[in-house]
Amino acid sequence: MTYAKRLQALMLGLAVSASIPALAEPVITGRPVEHQLNLQLPVTGIGEEVYNLHNYMMLVCLVIFIGVFGVMFYSVFKHRKSLGHKPATFHESTAVEIAWTVVPFLIVIGMALPATRTVVAMKDTSNADLTIKATGMQWKWGYDYLKGEGEGISFLSNLSTPRALVGGPGVEPVGQRNENYLLEVDNEVVVPVNKKVRLITTANDVIHSWTIPAFAVKQDAIPGFVRDTWFKADQIGTYRGNCVELCGKDHAFMPIVVKVVSAEDYTKWVNDKKAAMAASADDATKTWTLDELKTRGEKVYTTNCVACHQANGKGVPNAFASLDGSPVVNGPKAEQINVLLNGKHSGKFPSAMPAWKQLSDTEIASVITYTRNSWGNKAAENIVQPAEVMAARSK
């Protein structure tokens, strides 16, 4: 009686919630939430198909489970020895042999056909309105808008959660974390709503993986290879994911944030972004002072280099080279310019030093100057001008 009352109350609660739109309609957050069941609610057509396929497959598995175990338990209880039943003596049954061959085959076909259709649709990247290249690197994402409105826009996207909030082994976090802790970036990917976006993925060091659950998109980014996928978001909002391929010690700090906006807002963002890029494009022919380069270089180093080489320039033993006392940093500046432009793999460490061509000539010149005048370094050639980097880049 108690269980019957509980079931009745549950059914009543479901009926009431279904009758109230505010309660019945799920809220799309674009991020994982506490105590979440099932997949994140999709905001793309492919995502909707994947979500429905998941539920369909689970239902099929449930029916099979109930059917198989129902027959098994029925046979055990209804044909037990205490009721006087005796073991059957038949040896073979052609009908049973055919049934347990044909029925699973039909079940597999019924599951494979809709899944195959969805997989084929996921691979169709033709007729895209916008093409974006995502480059994975330890440990951030680089984005280049290659085709469509916004072509030419390029930026790096880093975790914006302060490291003090992250903490670490034996180190308590300092400050109050927000709900998007470790899922926020300094530069979001912005795309227009209801437009097909082709995403090209690659990497410049190790394998990464670009993933947004609400889009049902997960595409590996592999060094030396170009992979692609697509999405078409049908709801305005902010959607979050991260790298889901173990890629090194800061793997947990590679979030992905995509902001879907209206066509008008996207056009405004493109214009503002291009204006900001033009304003930040430094004149490579300008002669900078040592103090100017060191100040600018410290910011570039903190943003792009500190994760591997550390704030004190000591690197990580057996993982990343120390810049403090490095013969490259203290030697001829031409070699260090070449390393930043083209990368280097000396074989002394597991990971290669990636190329940083995506940085401007001024950024490269300033960060080299900063390293040559920091910590215990006292390089003879202690200043590098942007014009020198520009000349090396053109060779």
Image (cartoon, rainbow, N blue to C red):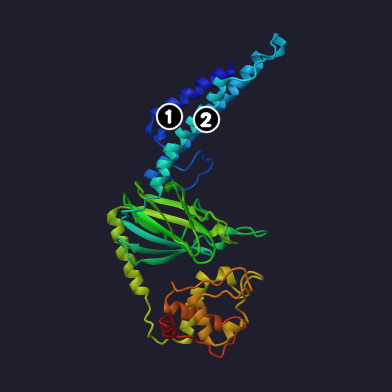
Front disc: 2 or 1: 2
Numbered mark located on residue 104 in the image: 2
Residue situated furthest bottom in the rendering: 380
Numbered mark located on residue 17 in the image: 1
Residue 65, position in %: x, y?
56, 28
| Mark 1: few/some/many CA within 10 Å (<14, 14-19, 20+) | some
Q: Is residue 43 left or right of residue 174?
A: left
Q: Secondary structure at mark 2?
A: helix
Numbered mark located on residue 86 in the image: none
Q: Residue at x 70, y 12 (%)?
A: 86
Q: What's the residue type where badge 1 is placed?
A: Ser
The numbered mark, 2 or 1, whose residue comes first in the sequence reads 1
Residue 60, position in %: x, y?
50, 30
In the displayed structure, 281 sits above or below 192; it is below
In the displayed structure, 386 sits above or below 82; it is below
Residue situated furthest right in the rendering: 82
* Callout 2–callout 1 Cβ contact below 8 Å: no
Residue situated furthest left in the rendering: 264
In the displayed structure, 385 sits above or below 145; it is below
Residue 331, position in %: x, y?
57, 87
Residue 239, position in %: x, y?
43, 51
In the displayed structure, 301 sits above or below 173; it is below
Q: Is residue 174 visible?
A: no
**Image quarter of residue 310:** bottom right
Q: Is residue 366 visible?
A: yes
| Mark 2: few/some/many CA within 10 Å (<14, 14-19, 20+) | few
Q: What's the residue type where badge 2 is placed?
A: Pro
Q: Is residue 226 left or right of residue 251?
A: left
Q: Residue at x 52, y 86 (%)?
A: 333
